[in-house]
Image: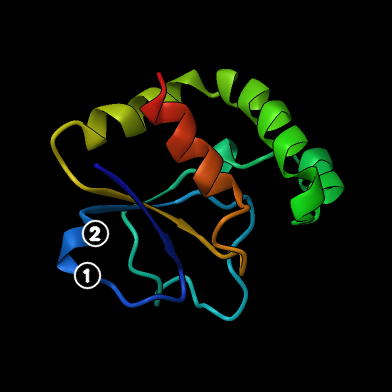
Amino acid sequence: MLKLKRVYDDVSQQDGKRILVDGVWPRGIKKEDLEHDEWYKEIAPSSDLRKWFDHDPDKWEEFKKKYKKELKEQKGLVDQIKKDSDGHNVTLLYAAKDEEHNQAVVIKEYIENK
């Protein structure tokens, strides 16, 4: 089962495998302080797409379309997350303040609809 969680939220045993899906390290957190199993920075949106989107909810639908095209290029990481979450909890970690409009939401939707 795929779950989503901000990197600033408390760790839970129900998190299972914890995968950071941001392209850059989260602000204010030392690398040794973030409890995570993997950092798949390659799966994050391209810099151009991230800058264009700028967490603007008005661009959300277009961002999702563009980002899903990018995710097709990350088949190995997408397949690994899907495999890991088959019968097990996997939590996708992200730093964005907006819990509804971020790349982890798109990754989860993309994998669940595959």
State the CA–CA distance, disc 1 to disc 2: 5 Å
Residue 46 position, x and y percent, is: 73, 38
* Badge count: 2
Dot 2 amino acid type: Asp
Dot 1 amino acid type: Ser
Q: Determine the residue positioned at 80% across, 55% down.
A: 54
Q: Determine the residue positioned at 60% across, 19% down.
A: 73
Q: Which mark is residue 35?
A: none
Residue 88 position, x and y percent, is: 16, 41
Read off the residue under disc 2.
15
Residue 42 position, x and y percent, is: 58, 37
Q: Is the residue under label 2 in contact with that under label 1 (CB below 8 Å)?
A: yes
19 up-or-down from 82: above or below: below
Callout 1 environment at 10 Å: few (<14), some (14 to 19), or many (20+)? few
The answer to which of 41 and 45 lies nearer the viewer is 45
User: Is 98 situated left or right of 47 in this image?
Assistant: left
